[in-house]
Amino acid sequence: MNRLVKGTVLTTLICIGLSACGGQEEVKAPIKQPVKEQAAAQASDLDPEKLLTSLRNHTTLVPIGEVPVPEDNPMKPEVLELGQMLFFDPRLSGNNEVSCQTCHDPGMGYGDNQATFNTYTGGYGARNSPTVINAGYYSTNFWDGRAASLEEQALGPIENPNEMNQQLDELIQELSAIKGYQEKFQAAFNDGITEQNIAKALAAFQRQIVVKDTPYDRFLEGETDALTSQEISGLRIFSGKAFCVTCHNGPNLSDNNFYNIGINTEDKGRQAVTGQETDLGRIRTPGLYGITHTAPYMRDGSLATLEEVIDYYNRGGDNHPNKSFFMQKFMSPLGLTEQEKADLLAFLKTLGGEPPVFKKPELP
């Protein structure tokens, strides 16, 4: 069994164990191979066919596939058209100046390229504006997972006094007074303008904002020349030595679980939702598709580049008191060489893709 297989199998087993019991049990450290054996294993892993076979057999890395669509909110053209209008319309905010697009700009990777968002009153919010790219693949939304669906997420920023500061009952009255919106809602939904239908239209529109069919996906589908030798080396590191695959796995490269990765911040993370002390500072694993378009990184926007992200994990993160046991045990530090960091960066860049760019339509 080569080094990649050992690493990925161990990583998967440890991740499952930690998720089940809060990450406090003792886990054996990976067994280090002699230098000569390591070199031989690495050379073997760089054979694209062998690497692909290992990934298929021993990891949960799979092509992304189609975005899941709920049965009660099909992607009807009328709904998508309405959702696009609502996404770009500042009249959804209390002062008629802030739209969803304000923090999720198509020209900025559907984020805002700022460390943290600008609040309704002009200050700075506590968290980075997460990109909308591939948001439809998550099982929960927001950094802390407080929304159980994209439909539920869509209404959160509208009501939030720090974001759009709009009461939903007042918004319905305002939209109902606009003849064009009356017609658009009636065409999309039998019951016209309701809170639920506003959420459905926004969610359906956002499910179109997808990055897929990347060189990484084509590689996993069997097109082994879709990645360069350096990118293949980076994928080997991603799924082995760097332990990225521990959390970044599955169709959207997110396990949809919550971890404290050591960032020194007062943000309570998942604890604010569950009230559990063990969830202090934990955040949901973000997907990696579109990653080249979405800087800065981390929930507080504290890392400006992908190079800084790699360096952060390579040193084992910072020292938050509730930092993940796995990070403390196996990632402090990782010990990546400069070449390995360069290779990992090259692989991550293959996930950037080209997000679809939707523009502001003519509003009613």
Image (cartoon, rainbow, N blue to C red):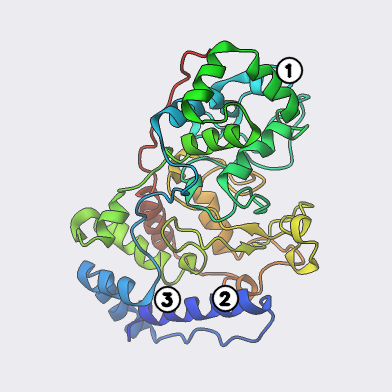
Give the mark count: 3
Q: Between marks 3 and 2, how big is the CA–CA gap?
A: 13 Å
Left or right of residue 328, residue 2 in this image: left
Q: Earlier in the sequence, mark 3 or mark 2?
A: 3
- The quarter in which the N terminus is drawn is bottom left
Q: Of discs 3 and 2, which sits in the foreground?
A: 3
Mark sitting on residue 195: none
Mark sitting on residue 8: 3
Give neighbour class at mark 1: few <14, some 14-19, many 20+ (Cα, 10 Å). few
Residue drawn 72% across and 55% down? 269
Is residue 196 positioned above or below 62 on the image? above
> Can residue 165 be seen in the rendering of this structure?
no
Q: Where is residue 174? Give x, y as percent.
A: 68, 17
Residue drawn 63% across and 31% down? 194
Residue drawn 36% across and 79% down? 5
Is residue 284 positioned above or below 333 on the image? above
Name the residue nearer the viewer: 294 or 97.
Answer: 97
Q: Of discs 2 and 1, which sits in the foreground?
A: 1
Confirm or deny contact between disc 1 and disc 3 (CB under 8 A).
no
**Which residue matches tag 2?**
330
Give neighbour class at mark 2: few <14, some 14-19, many 20+ (Cα, 10 Å). some
Residue drawn 45% across and 85% down? 32
Q: Secondary structure at mark 1?
A: loop
**Which residue matches tag 1?**
95
Q: Between marks 2 and 1, how big is the CA–CA gap?
A: 49 Å
Q: Which amino acid, mark 1?
A: Asn
Left or right of residue 360, residue 197 in this image: right
Confirm or deny contact between disc 3 and disc 2 (CB under 8 A).
no
Q: Earlier in the sequence, mark 1 or mark 3?
A: 3
Left or right of residue 362, residue 221 in this image: left
Name the residue nearer the viewer: 243 or 222.
Answer: 222
